[in-house]
Image (cartoon, helix red, strand yellow):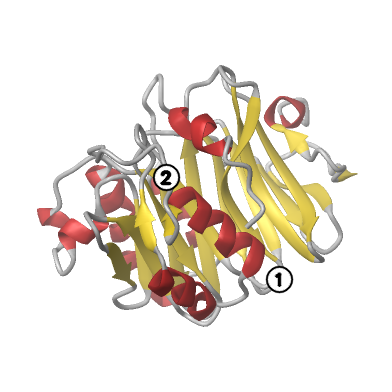
Amino acid sequence: MKISICIAFLLVSISIACTGYAVYADKTWYGMNFDYPPESDIRFSVSDYEGCSIFMMHFFNNDRMFWVPTVGMNEHGLFSSLQYQCPMIEGTPHQSPGELYIYQLFNTAINDCSLLYELECVIDSVELINLYDLTLHTLIADTSGNALIAEAGEGENLITGINGNWIVMTNFPNADFINTTPAEIVGVGDERYRRAFAYIEENYSSFGLPEAIGTLEAAVNNDAEWGTKASMVFDPLERKVYIGIDGDFQRIWRISMDERIIETWSGFIKYRSALMGVNGINVPQLRTWK
C-alpha cells in the first residue's frame, strides 16, 4: 500500500458533502463533485505508481499543510471516490493486524488493482475500520460493470453492491438503505442523491458525455460554505477526465492520461493546452484560462 500513516491525521477535514457515481450504459462513465470550503486549494495530476498511470485529485489541508487525495482513476479504468460518511461512527486510533482503514482501501484500489474482484479479495481478508474522529466510505468501480460502496461496520464489512446499471454515493451510509427507494432515504446528502439518481434514470437510454456532465450539474451543491469546487467526469476506456471548477459547467477542460495534457474542451474563447508537470495543475491556475 505504501501510504504514510500520517494521511490518517490529514483527512480529518475531508468534505462533508460530495457526490460520486458510476454508470454503465453504452459506455462506462464515472463522476464526482468535490464540495469543500473555498479557502482550500485543489489540484489535478497524472503520475506513475509502480509503472501504472494514475489520475488523482487532491485538496490542500491548510491546517496540516499537506495535499490529500480524494478521487482518482488508474490507467486500467478502475475508479474510486473517497467521501465523508455521516453520521460519524467512533473508530479507532490504533490499527491492529488484519484491519484496514477505509482510506487505505481507497489507495489500494487506485494503486494496486485493475478490476474490482482483485479488491474484493482484499476486502474479504481484512476488517474495514474507521479512523477515531473521521468516518469515510468509498465508491469503487471498474470497466466490467462491477461497482460497490465499502463502509466499516461494527465488526463487519458493509458492502453495498451495484443493483442495476448505476450506483450513486453521497454521505448517508448506503448499507442502511439497501433495497430502499430514493424517496425513502433520509440522511446527509439525500437530496443530492435523489437528484443524481433521477437524472441518470431519466437519461439512461442515451447516456453519453453530456449526460455524464449533466448528472454532476444536477447534483451540484450551491451551499455558500460547502459548495461544489471541482467536478470530474471520467471516461475510463479513453483514459480521459473532463473537469469543471467552481460549480461552473459552461467551461470544461479535458485531461488525457496517456498524453498527460490538459486542454480547453468547451466554453472557452480560444483553445489552450499544457503539459501536466509532476505537480499537476491547480484550480487558481485554471481560473486564468479564458
Residue 177 lies, in percent from the top left, at 17, 60
Residue at the outermost left position: 184
Q: Is residue 253 above or below residue 215?
A: above
The circle drawn on residue 238 is: 1
Residue 35 lies, in percent from the top left, at 45, 34
Q: Is residue 223 above or below residue 230?
A: above
Q: Residue at x 78, y 31 (%)?
A: 289
The circle drawn on residue 226 is: none
> In which image quadrant can residue 126 be found?
bottom left
In the image: residue 5, left or right of residue 218: right
For disc 2, the neighbor class at 10 Å (few under 14, some 14 to 19, many from 20) is many
The one of 77 and 27 positioned closer to us in this rendering: 77
The one of 152 and 220 positioned closer to us in this rendering: 152
For disc 1, the neighbor class at 10 Å (few under 14, some 14 to 19, many from 20) is few
Q: Are marks 1 and 2 in contact (CB under 8 Å)?
A: no
The residue singled out by tag 2 in the image is 83
Q: Residue at x 13, y 64 (%)?
A: 180
